[in-house]
Amino acid sequence: MTNLSAIALLTIWRKECQRFLRIWIQTLIPPAITMSLYFVIFGNLIGSKIGQMGEFSYMEFIVPGLIMMSVITNSYANVSSSFYSAKFQRNVEELLVAPVSNWIIIAGFVGGGVARALLIGFIVTCVSLLFVDIKIHSLPMIVITLLLTAVLFSTAGLINAIYANSFDDISIIPTFVLTPLTYLGGVFYSLSLLPEFWQNVSKLNPVVYMVNGFRYGFLGSSDVNHFMSLGLLVGFNILLLGFAYSLIKRGVGIRS
Amino acid sequence: MYALQISELTKTYKGGTQALKGIDLSVQQGDFFALLGPNGAGKSTTIGIICSLVNSSSGSVKVFDFDLNTQSIEAKSCIGLVPQEFNFNQFEQVWQIMLNQAGYYGVSKKQAIPRAEKYLKQLDLWDKRHTQARQLSGGMKRRLMIARALMHEPKILILDEPTAGVDIEIRRSMWTFLEDLNKQGVTIILTTHYLEEAESLCKNVAIIDKGTIVQNTSMKSILATLNIETFILDLAENTDSLSLEGFDYRLVDPHTLEVDIAKDSCLNAVFEQLSNKNVKVLSMRNKSNRLEELFVRMVESGRNSEHKDHKEIHND
């Protein structure tokens, strides 16, 4: 990477981080409050009635899923709203006019989404420590799954923002696609509780692999093969990053 | 050396609108160049293509011999753009906007800080450096866009209507600033609807209309083609009827006379005739500035000839 590209990348990334830190009341506090409520209601109140989930308490079971859920929603929301705002206010033109390569633009915005996702992941983990002792089975698995998921959903948020023509367009996908996939992605239950047919249907949901891969890192147990989870994450990342690059290169949604 | 070379540039938008019909344009290094044209003529499309905001349909653009398609990093590094519409992040502080801009061009923070201070001071924005951009006045926002465009010290500065909506005092101070910048060797390309601005600042001019360059010459020679100038004379007496032999004139009201003076005729003859009729002239001024007059005539003659062509085609 040339010196010019390194400085440009750092500038975009820093600008993205400053953006979500500047509006911390909108970006950092709500996920902490929402996840605390999940821990209290599902983990403590309802979870105590549910009992064990395999060999783990219900609270231990849902902690990785809830961290992953906040990582997914925040990485997506950060890039989709930031890039769309840049389009809306036209300050994306600053980047198009400057000698910044398309990969650097993608890396800067995705990097900002990953930074917010990791910070939220850390906050939610800290909140969960108030309710349960966290076990760690494989730290590398936790880190790799977390990073790949954050990159994947940041890129998906970028693609959404590239196509978006209004603020409504960046809320449709999270509401009608992302939330159902996450809730049905094994955050709150094990796939083994479902009838075989619905287990097979659930395995078509990519979020299942992310949640379970991440959960394997904590508990050492998963509904799906964790290597398959990693493989799918890598595959989806290559696909979406390539697609985002082709959109930016052709100027879809940003150049006339 | 040419700062900018455009050849056979075309642009057809998705809806089929042909904004540029194969334009050729060259701007010498160090020039102060005006790109003029009526609304919708293709000025903004041309600037958009030069600045990579619009994809061209065909043709080539070279900036200091760097091809915009194949050597885009080098070409883009030479260009600074002051766009027509505010396009900075309204929620960022002035200082941050300046430093971010430097960063996009690979300028280190160590270099960027004194540079930002220099340009903010020169453009009277230093006191506003910690103010959010949205809280600036219109004139300040315009000056911020100029300061921002200079953060990487471009060799060529493109200004698209830089003084639109700015009061005359600030406009004149911006002119002085741009003139100084040009003297330091920066090539400047300006589009403006204030033709007085183009006439007083620019050495060369191109006029674009309906996606075609209709004139590309020096400001001096284009002004030399102006055959008739209209003068307004403020008269002392109430004059209900007046006749001037050998001149086209209009009595706008009993105190105001408009006279068209051909390039080869003499103003003295007008005054002589008015003195003979005991009409006193209090003051005299140009109806519009010379370039404006020429521009209007050029565009109107284009429209008329097109109208005539249509008529002929219709008659066939």
Image (tube, coloured by chain):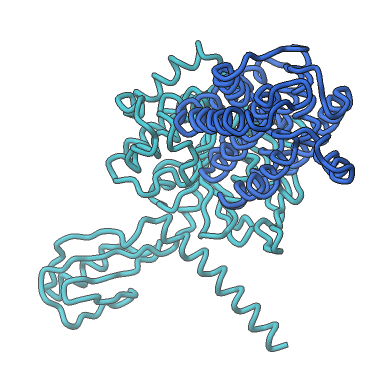
User: In front here: B139 or B191?
Assistant: B139
Quarter holding the N terminus of chain B is top right
Q: Picture coordinates of residue A66 (x, y %)?
A: 65, 29
> Does residue B97 sit above or below A200 in this rendering?
above
Q: Is residue B104 visible?
A: no
Specify whether A176 is left or right of B216: right
Q: Picture coordinates of residue B224 (x, y %)?
A: 47, 54
The residue at the point 68 percent across, 21 percent down is A60
Specify whether B117 is left or right of A10: left
Quarter holding the C terminus of chain B is bottom right
User: In front here: A23 or B209?
Assistant: A23
How many marks can you see? Answer: 0
> Does residue B191 sit above or below B63 in this rendering?
below
The residue at the point 62 percent across, 39 percent down is A80
Q: Picture coordinates of residue A196 (x, y %)?
A: 89, 42
User: In front here: A37 or B22?
Assistant: A37
User: In front here: B252 or B111?
Assistant: B111
Q: Colour of chain A?
A: blue
> Does residue B289 sit above or below A126 in this rendering?
below
Q: Is residue A161 visible?
A: yes
**Residue A250, quarter of the rendered image:** top right
The residue at the point 71 percent across, 16 percent down is A2
> Does residue B267 sit above or below A49 in this rendering?
below
Instruction: Report the chain shown in cyan.
Output: B
Q: Picture coordinates of residue B217 (x, y %)?
A: 56, 48
Specify whether B164 is left or right of A78: left
| Residue that lies at the very extreme toward the bottom in this rendered image | B315
